[in-house]
Every structure is written in structure tokens, then in C-alpha cells.
Amino acid sequence: MTQVSRPTGADREPAYVVGEVSALRPLLAAAGLGLGIATVREPGPRPAGPAEAAAAASMPARRRLEFLAGRRAARRALRAVGLHCGEIPRSGRLPVFPPGRAASISHSAGIAVAVARAASPGLPLGCDLELRPLPRAAARLVLRADEDGLLDDRDEPFHAGSRPTGAGWTVTELFSAKEAAWKALAGTGTGPALGPACLGEAGEGPQGLRPARPTGSLRDLRVGPAEDGLCVVRLRADPARAVRVRVVRVGTGVFGYVLGPSPSLGPSAALG
């Protein structure tokens, strides 16, 4: 990934991060994914229809801007793969898309991203943007003991761009990988789930450490390294349910997205 000089001043930070995420478009396109980006600072954010307007009206001002930015990002991701979509209502915390359309939405620090896929709509879909790095001390909220060997020895080393192959992972990278995988395995807004109904809804709420889901947590997933700096995230209760995830560093954070299903471990495989 081409490195650019980092702008100075807090007001320039969103534009800098948006530029880094935008530079990932060819990488996602090669995987058959469209990318959409929006920010809460865009002028004149408007709901695309009455359902979005009703949902937005019930939210605090900051959450309303995040919600509308997420909807814009989803429509832009769909347009990137040749699909058009009007308003995107919600059911609970989940976006509801028209038939034949789906996208995964994530927000962090005033920036919303979404990924969509045109071909093979039954493939898993999930993404996660984390622009506020998590401390090493948060590892136990994300990982189990059998995943500790994946962690980098340093607290939170960051260099923007694709992560170095063979290097240890930060807590933020592993969190983002699991969060993106959760959305794909639970089928949140993307059609049929790869995981069973016991997976809770990840939804599209503000990023950061979330409370445990009523029926599970990210610790119910197990992450492991794969080729080319990718990782595989499996459901511990059913290891055959697995997806491949790429995590890329952007700004002071990361962007993780699901590439597709991972090959089965075989009938005798089991995870603790």
C-alpha cells in the first residue's frame, strides 16, 4: 500500500483515514467486494425514506449521524458492485435490505464503512472498522488462553498499510477479525447464516468493546493464522463453521473484512 504523509491537526484526521480506507478498493474488488465509505461530517445528511427517518428520529444526535452515515456507506458499497438500493430500514439493530441486496456496516470515530457483494449472494459477508486501538489488557475479553500465542509481544505496534506476514497480532486486530466474522457467521443483514441460531446479533452499534451478547461472545469464536497474512475464524461449538478474514491497518486502527468461507476441518476436528 502506498504510504502518504500524515496531515496535521485533528480536523484532518477523518480525511486521512478515509483516504487510507479508500485505497483498499482494488484489494476488496479483487475479492468480489464493493466498498462504501461515509462520514458524519458530510453536509446535509438526510434519511433516504420514511423508515430511515423514523429510526433516526428516535436516536440521540451523535448516534443519528452514525446511523445515516452507515446507510449511505451501504448504498455506496452496493453501487460499487452495480446494485442500487433505496432506504434501508431496520429490525431491532439490524439493517433490512431488499431481496438480492446485502451489505455489512461498521462505524468508528465518525466514519462508516460497508462492504457488499454482487455475485454469489449466499457467500458470507462481514466487516469491522476499529479506529480506537484496544490495550493489551483487553485481551481476555476477546480471547481465550489457547489464542494467547497469536498476540504480538509489544503492546500495540501500528504501521498503516497491510500487516506484515508472520508478525504477531494486536488485540485490536484480533477483535476486528472476530467481529467481522461474527457478523458473517450470524448472518446479520446478509441472508443465510453460516453459524447456528445460538450466535447473537452483532448489529451495527458504535465500535469498541461491546457487552457480551445474550447468547454468546467473541470468545465463542477461535481465530487462527492462515496463508498470506489472513486468519481463519471458527465457531468453537461447530468448527466446520468458519470464514477467512483479512485485517488491514488504517490510520491508528484496523479494518477487517470477510473474504469467504473457510474449508472444513474434517469430521474429527474439535476446539476447546
Image: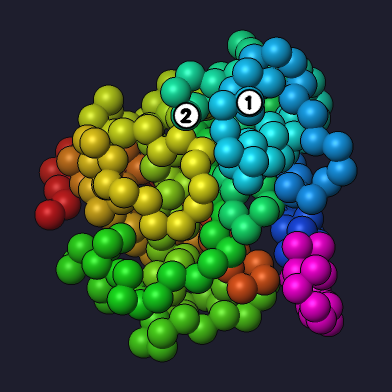
Helix, strand or loop at disc 2?
Answer: loop
- Whichever of labels 2 and 1 marks the residue nearer the N terminus, that label is 1
Residue 151 location, x and y as percent?
35, 76
Q: Nearer the viewer, residue 88 or 28?
A: 88
- The residue type indicated by label 2 comes to Arg
- The residue type indicated by label 1 comes to Ala
Whether tag 2 and tag 1 are in contact, CB under 8 A, the answer is no
Q: Nearer the viewer, residue 8 or 191?
A: 8
Q: Is residue 226 visible?
A: no
Q: Residue at x 64, y 41 (%)?
A: 61
Which residue does the numbered mark 1 point to in the structure image?
57
Q: Quadrant of residue 45?
A: top right
Label placed on residue 7 = none
Q: Nearer the viewer, residue 228 or 84?
A: 84
The segment highlighted magenta reads 1-16
Relative placement, left or right, of 198 versus 179 is: left
- Disc 2 and disc 1: Cα gap in Å? 15 Å
Q: Is residue 112 above or below residue 21?
A: above
Which residue does the numbered mark 2 point to in the structure image?
93
